[in-house]
Image (cartoon, rainbow, N blue to C red):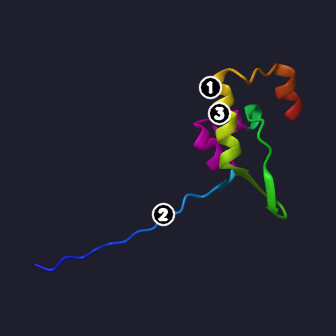
Amino acid sequence: MPTTNLNISVIDKRMLKQSEAASYAGLPVRHFKATCPVRPVELKQGMQLWDRRDLDLWIDDVKSGAVTETRDTILGRL
């Protein structure tokens, strides 16, 4: 019986669209927009992308209790 090897290379994207970044953080887009302090990067004119590493740092800060945002700081980003 012949055997076949399948080599698949998967590259994780570092830069995420807003919907992908929200999903990565486990949040609906609307909630992500209102609460995420991570600023997007504009690699191409008009295209905003979120860096996965920055999102990881934010999530780690939230987990450790380092992020204590007030309603005013959240509204200020809107």
Q: Amino acid at mark 1?
A: Lys
The residue beneath circle 1 is 63
Image location (x, y in percent) of residue 69: 79, 22
Position of residue 33 measured from the top left corner of the image (x, y, whole percent): 74, 38
Residue type indicated by callout 2: Val
Characterize the magenta stretch by its predominant secondary structure: helix
Residue at x-position 87% and y-position 22%: 72
Quadrant placement of the C terminus: top right
Are the residues flagged by discs 3 and 1 in contact, CB closer than 8 Å? yes
> Residue 38 sits in which quadrant?
top right
Q: What amino acid type is highlighted by mark number 3?
A: Ile
Above or below, 1 against 56 in this view is below
Distance of label 3 from label 1 (alpha carbons) = 6 Å
**Label 2: which residue?**
10
Q: Rounded to the nearest whole Å, what is the CA distance between mark 1 and mark 2?
A: 29 Å
Q: Please say if 13 is above or below 64.
A: below
First in sequence: mark 1 vs mark 2:
2
Q: Residue at x 37, y 71 (%)?
A: 7
Give neighbour class at mark 1: few <14, some 14-19, many 20+ (Cα, 10 Å).
few
* Figure label count: 3
The residues tagged by marks 2 and 3 sit, at their Cα atoms, a distance apart of 24 Å
Give the quarter of the image for residue 25. Answer: top right
Query: In the rendering, at what x and y percent does residue 18 appear?
Result: 69, 48
Q: Secondary structure at mark 3?
A: helix
Q: Which quadrant of the rendered structure holds the N terminus?
A: bottom left
Residue span colored magenta: 18-32
Looking at the rendered structure, the secondary structure element under dot 1 is helix
Point out the tag, 2 or 3, that comes first from the N-terminus.
Answer: 2
**Residue under label 3:** 59
Asked which secondary structure carries label 2, the reply is loop
Q: Is residue 12 left or right of residue 2?
A: right
